[in-house]
Image: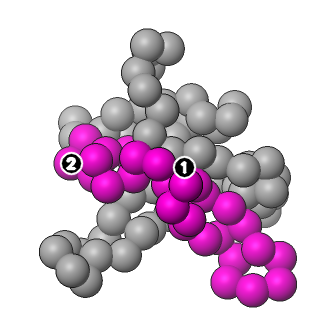
């Protein structure tokens, strides 16, 4: 992990709080990190969020004090995206900045 990388995605304080809460409740192992990326392809791609181990395709970022995995192939699709959390609604949301 280097500090010179451009951070592609913003994580709000509300989303950060919910991620930390989920880590505590679910007992995620220490070698797992928050993963954000895409599922599917072309016009039908959707954003994804979860906890995962690092692979050779990943970049590890520290964003808003969270260690975040992003597949290198997904980076360009996450630039200027914000991860937020809505308590009364859809849960985690991805918004274009």
Tell me the quadrant of the picture where the C terminus can be found: bottom right
Between 11 and 96, the one lying in front of the other is: 96
Judging by the rendered image, the residue that carries numbered circle 1 is 34
First to last magenta residue range: 69-97
- Residue 73 is tagged as 2
Q: Is residue 82 magenta?
A: yes
User: Which type of secondary structure does the marked residue at label 1 adopt?
Assistant: strand
Whole-percent x, y for residue 15 in the image: 72, 57
Hey, which quadrant is residue 5 in on the image? Answer: top left
Q: Is residue 63 left or right of residue 6?
A: right
- Residue 88 is tagged as none
Hey, which quadrant is residue 77 in on the image? Answer: bottom left
Whole-percent x, y for residue 44 in the image: 25, 83
Hey, which quadrant is residue 55 in on the image? Answer: top left
Whole-percent x, y for residue 20 in the image: 76, 50
Residue located 54% across and 49% down the image: 34
Asked whether disc 1 touches disc 2, contact meaning CB atoms under 8 Å apart, the reply is no
Residue located 38% across and 58% down the image: 37
Q: Is residue 12 left or right of residue 49?
A: right
Tell me the quadrant of the picture where the N terminus can be found: top left
Q: Is residue 89 left or right of residue 7?
A: right
Residue located 39% across and 52% down the image: 78
Q: Is residue 56 left or right of residue 15?
A: left
User: Which type of secondary structure does the marked residue at label 2 adopt?
Assistant: helix
């Amino acid at each position: 992990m280097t500090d010179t990388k451009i951070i592609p995605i913003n994580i709000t304080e509300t989303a950060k709080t919910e991620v930390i809460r989920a880590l505590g409740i679910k007992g995620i192992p220490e070698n797992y990190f928050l993963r954000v990326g895409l599922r599917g392809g072309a016009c039908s791609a959707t954003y994804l969020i979860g906890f995962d181990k690092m692979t050779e395709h990943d970049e590890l970022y520290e964003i808003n004090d969270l260690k975040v995995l992003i597949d290198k192939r997904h980076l360009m699709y996450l630039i200027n995206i914000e991860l937020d959390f809505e308590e009364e609604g859809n849960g985690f949301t991805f918004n274009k900045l």
